[in-house]
Amino acid sequence: MQATFPHPSGSSSLLSAFRATESEWLAYAFYTNKISGILSGAFDANLWQRLVVQVADTEPTVRHGIFALGNLFRHYGVSDGMSECVCPRCRQALRHYNKAISSFAQYMQRPRDQLTIDVALLSCLIFICIESYRLNDRIAISLITKGCGMIAEAMPRALATQTVAIDSGLLNLFDRLWLLSSMFGHHIPRPSQRPASPTSTLGQLPLEGTIQTARDRLHEIITLVQSLRLRVFQAQMKSMSVSERVATITSLQQEQQTVLLLLENWQSGLQGLIDRQGLHSFRDSQAWSILTVHWLITKIRAGASMDPSEIDSEDQSEDFRNLVAVAEGSLVQHPQESEANDFSFEPGFLPALYLTARKCRDSVTRRKALELMSLASGKEGLWYRSELRCITARVIELEEGLAVLGSQDQLGTVNQKPIRFYDILADLNYRHGGRTYVNVTYLMYDADSDSRWRTARETLTITE
């Protein structure tokens, strides 16, 4: 039986223009009343609660995507068996997901003048969300690549004709997904070659700026730090003359100081924005806590970016403690209300707590960060809590001498005591025999060894 019902929000100005079965309306209502708020997180209500619902009224691709999400999120929560689940809700979700994919294929066959880039990107975004929730991260990353490619293709026409407008929220979101993908070792071209803010002004927030402006500026600085760390690593690995190495390192050190100044200016700019606009209650919000934690971990990563052994992290001990304190305050104040809340589309506290537990040299602080990870969402974008906790616990064991690598995975004779890992490289996890595994590579820099770089590899079984 099909019927047309008013929009579940109860708004008299929004009446749904499509027909659906009773079960579809239940899924739709669950999305509009619950899931859209979860996916919005602390910042993106306009996208998930307004734009997605608005487009769903006329586009079956997005509408079936909503039906799929409405069923999927009524599952019992994120778990390592999600990708294999065949419960009634997941089967229903997959049916609508397949319909959404079919509708998307039909949509893309329309004449170009009947295609809207926002509809294509929203469809791609919903597909990414579904695959991320089901722990199919390889597919999610391939979809991120697809979405970034669509933007890259559309941008030249948009600039040339000024007739193709891409929603700024979608543009910024795919730019963040591009950075997220690169953090997982999947480097793709940046989706939009928008004129970047001059480096000297990135840390400054305009007088009429908003919290969203502050978030976007911080994202640009995080991008600079990620690039800096990658180029430092490449310089350390590259064979070059002494003079060339000195020149390269000097240039990178200057860039590091610039980035640290940008971060300092950004933080003072955010405080000024809050004071000017009377947003004092914002300091009690989850959004403020997330921005602060992201700023602190970026400051830590920038400060340690020039040291290949990363053993100077003691210098950031106060920042680590502040990060843990802010995260704890927010996670306790804003606990997960239900298992449906066990997923967030974009990173919140989980990545910063993971990096803190991995890098902080104070045992109490790093173990507190590990403990707090259990209060974060089960999945934040591509960051999977069970996997991160498993890796972190293992790193702490190895660095604190509570365990040793197996004989086949040994680093060899290591002069550095205690062991300090430069980085941990984790492949995307995989399922086998009903269990979830992740292959981990430990990278260590030993300045006193003839071969400065050492690696060891082992497979970890993921358990909560």
Image: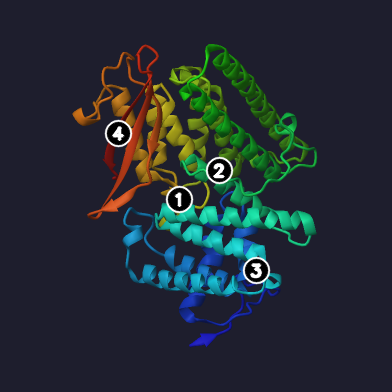
Q: CA distance from mark 3 to mark 1?
A: 28 Å
Residue flagged by tag 4: what amino acid is it?
Arg
| Residue situated in front as seen by the camera: 38 or 108 | 108
Viewport quadrant of the C terminus: top left
Q: Please report whichever mark, 3 or 1, sits nearer to the chain's N-terminal start.
A: 3
Residue 457 disc label: 4
The residues bearing labels 1 and 4 have C-alpha atoms spaced at a distance of: 35 Å
Q: Which is nearer the N-term, disc 4 or disc 2?
A: 2
Measured along the vertical axis of the image, is residue 311 above or below residue 395?
above
Q: Is residue 189 left or right of residue 79?
A: right
Q: Which residue is mark 2?
A: 179
Q: Amino acid at mark 3?
A: Gln
- Residue 63: mark: none
Q: Nearer the viewer, mark 2 or mark 3?
A: 2
- Badge 2 or badge 3: first in the primary sequence: 3
Q: Is residue 170 visible in the rendered structure shown here?
A: no
Label 1 sits on residue: 336
Q: CA distance from mark 1 to mark 2?
A: 26 Å
Q: Percent x, y for residue 156?
A: 72, 54
Q: Residue at x 61, y 33 (%)?
A: 224
Q: Residue at x 56, y 51 (%)?
A: 41
> Where residue 100 sits in the image (x, y, percent)?
51, 71
Q: Are the two marked residues, 1 and 4, in contact with CB atoms closer than 8 angstroms?
A: no
Q: Mark 4, mark 2: which one is toward the viewer?
A: 4
Q: Secondary structure at mark 1?
A: loop
Between 431 and 453, the residue placed more toward the observer is 453
Does dot 4 land on a helix, a strand or a loop?
strand
